[in-house]
Image (cartoon, rainbow, N blue to C red):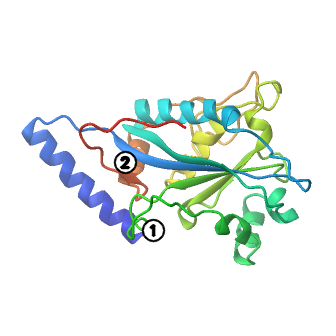
Amino acid sequence: MTVDLASAAARAGEAAFDTLSGRERNLGILRVQVLILSDEAGRPLSTPERVQPALATADRVLRAEAGVRVRVVGIRTVTEPPPAAALDPRANRGLVVDDLLGRTEFYRRHLGDPSAGPAAALVGSPITVVVVRRIAGHTTGCSLGISADWVITQAALFDEGDRHSYDETVLAHELGHAMNLPHHRDRGNLMFAESSPPQRVRGTQLARWQRRVVQANRHVLPGRSGDTPVLG
């Protein structure tokens, strides 16, 4: 939390300078990596190609709504069969308890980011999207918020052939939670709690205060001239 507050203060100073100088700010950068788990038989739960549309949606939404672009630093398949608690995790309070009890250690062992520098654990560290088989209850994604640098998403979300599960908004929604955004009561908002494809998919808007929270988050790096987004 201290890092986020310091980051927010720095961004506020940058914004004030930009306003006075008339300089147009570059887009911030959110680094994201994806871990696709495998089942008990070693079969991957999804593929990079299936996950790409949701990553592209997250990039499009965060660019338009928060001035932040998604830079994918890797999509990896974990062939090591995970324990049941990691393959089919619980959500919300259950996930918090499991994290405290060490049942999410399998995720943490595979979070390594080879491109990370020594300060990455504080500022600019990537958010990892872990693709699991099923999440307990009627939940398709879950995040521990600012207490973790990873989120979980259910594999069926990325299967275009399953019209009752396929939902490109969930990945972006969980990234929002990882960047300190709580749920929002407006269905048109990205952080609306529920999304029920194919008819009742949540919207992708963000309010002004939500944009400021995202831009001040420790995961977001300030943009630089010449930066280009990398998807895949």
- Relative placement, left or right, of 222 versus 57 is left
Residue matched to label 2: 215
The residue positioned farthest toward the right in the image shown: 41
For the residues labelled 1 and 2, the Cα–Cα distance comes to 18 Å
- Relative placement, left or right, of 98 versus 12 is right
**In-front residue for pair 125/99:** 125
Pick whichever of labels 1 and 2 is earlier in the sequence. Answer: 1
Q: Tell us which disc is closer to us: 1 or 2.
A: 1
Q: Residue at x 31, y 58 (%)?
A: 8
Element type at marker 2? helix
- Relative placement, left or right, of 218 versus 106 is left
Establish if 82 lies above or below 205.
below
Q: Residue at x 38, y 71 (%)?
A: 2
**In-front residue for pair 205/160:** 160
Q: Residue at x 41, y 36 (%)?
A: 229
Whether residue 202 is visible, yes or no, is yes
